């Protein structure tokens, strides 16, 4: 039996109808596998937080994360995925997401950078990103980073059994708006599991109860 839902593609290009199969819900063993993958994913972000410095290139960040991921027994999920050439995404300042690491891009004093890490471990995919402040950032940038973290915490508080993804999206959207920000509607989150970017597509501007 399949349930029909209307969602957007991962890249936010156009709405599409997708079939959600309840049999794809994760069993206890798979949940354990996802948690183990997630441990590596988070450990890599913790590791790189201690390595970042002014003058470092985003390609150097990519190499360090590749080496650490492999050392922990994982595989960078983004590397060669649909032709993507690097192991992570690095997005600096006003770049929304999916920036490609480069030897030409150096971290400067006052930058904020999002490092997006996706990990495969024993066939299980995990995915998370983290914002970092480089040197002395402006009050405007610091507020943005702080409010985004608050949005995440408020959104996570809405995630519970038999709850709705829309509860999370509304909490995120309302807090961002109340602080003078808007949320990019075309970009959202996604499921994790046995494939990269599993359904459902996760909007951050959704409505409570949906």
Image: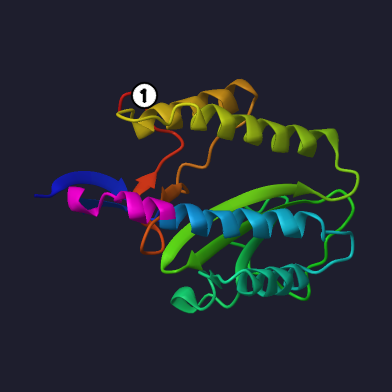
Which residue occupies 66% across, 49% down? Answer: 130
Q: Could you say which quadrant of the image residue 48 lies in?
A: bottom right
149, above or below 57, in the image: above
Residue 190 in view in this figure: yes
* Colour basis: rainbow
Q: Main secondary structure of the magenta part?
A: helix
**According to the image, label 1 marks what residue?**
208
Is residue 172 found left or right of 162 in the rendered image? right
Q: Is residue 143 left or right of residue 123?
A: right
Image mark count = 1
Relative to 59, does residue 21 appear above or below in the rendering? above
Does 7 appear in magenta?
Answer: no
Quadrant containing the C terminus is top left
Residue 22, x across and y down, in percent: 19, 48
Q: Residue furthest top?
A: 178
Q: Is residue 178 above or below residue 97?
A: above
Is residue 23 shown in magenta? Answer: yes
With 165 as the anchor, is 150 left or right in this view?
right
Quarter of the view holding residue 104: bottom right
Residue 163 at x, y percent in the picture: 33, 28
Residue at position x 42%, y 53% in the image: 32
Q: In screen coordinates, is 83 left or right of 28? A: right
Q: Secondary structure at mark 1?
A: loop
Residue 9 appears in the figure: no
Q: Residue at x 62, y 53 (%)?
A: 42
Query: Picture coordinates of residue 159 (x, y %)?
Result: 42, 31
The stretch in magenta equals: 21-32
Between 77 and 141, the one lying in front of the other is 77
């Amino acid at each position: 039996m399949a349930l029909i839902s209307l969602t957007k593609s991962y890249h936010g290009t156009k709405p599409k109808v997708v079939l959600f199969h309840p049999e794809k819900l994760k069993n206890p063993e798979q949940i354990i596998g996802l948690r183990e993958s997630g441990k590596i994913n988070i450990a890599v972000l913790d590791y790189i937080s201690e390595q970042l410095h002014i003058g470092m290139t985003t390609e150097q960040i990519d190499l360090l994360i590749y080496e650490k991921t492999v050392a922990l027994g994982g595989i960078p999920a983004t590397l060669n995925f649909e032709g993507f050439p690097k192991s992570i995404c690095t997005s600096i300042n006003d770049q929304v997401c999916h920036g490609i690491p480069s030897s030409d891009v150096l971290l400067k004093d006052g930058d904020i950078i999002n490092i997006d890490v996706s990990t495969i471990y024993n066939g299980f995919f995990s995915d998370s990103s983290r914002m970092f402040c480089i040197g002395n950032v402006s009050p405007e940038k610091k507020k943005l980073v702080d409010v985004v973290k608050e949005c995440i915490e408020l959104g996570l508080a809405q995630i519970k059994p038999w709850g709705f993804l829309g509860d999370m999206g509304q909490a995120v959207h309302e807090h961002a708006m109340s602080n003078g920000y808007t949320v990019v509607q075309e970009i959202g989150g996604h499921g994790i599991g046995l494939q990269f970017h599993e359904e459902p597509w996760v909007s951050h501007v959704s409505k409570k109860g949906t």
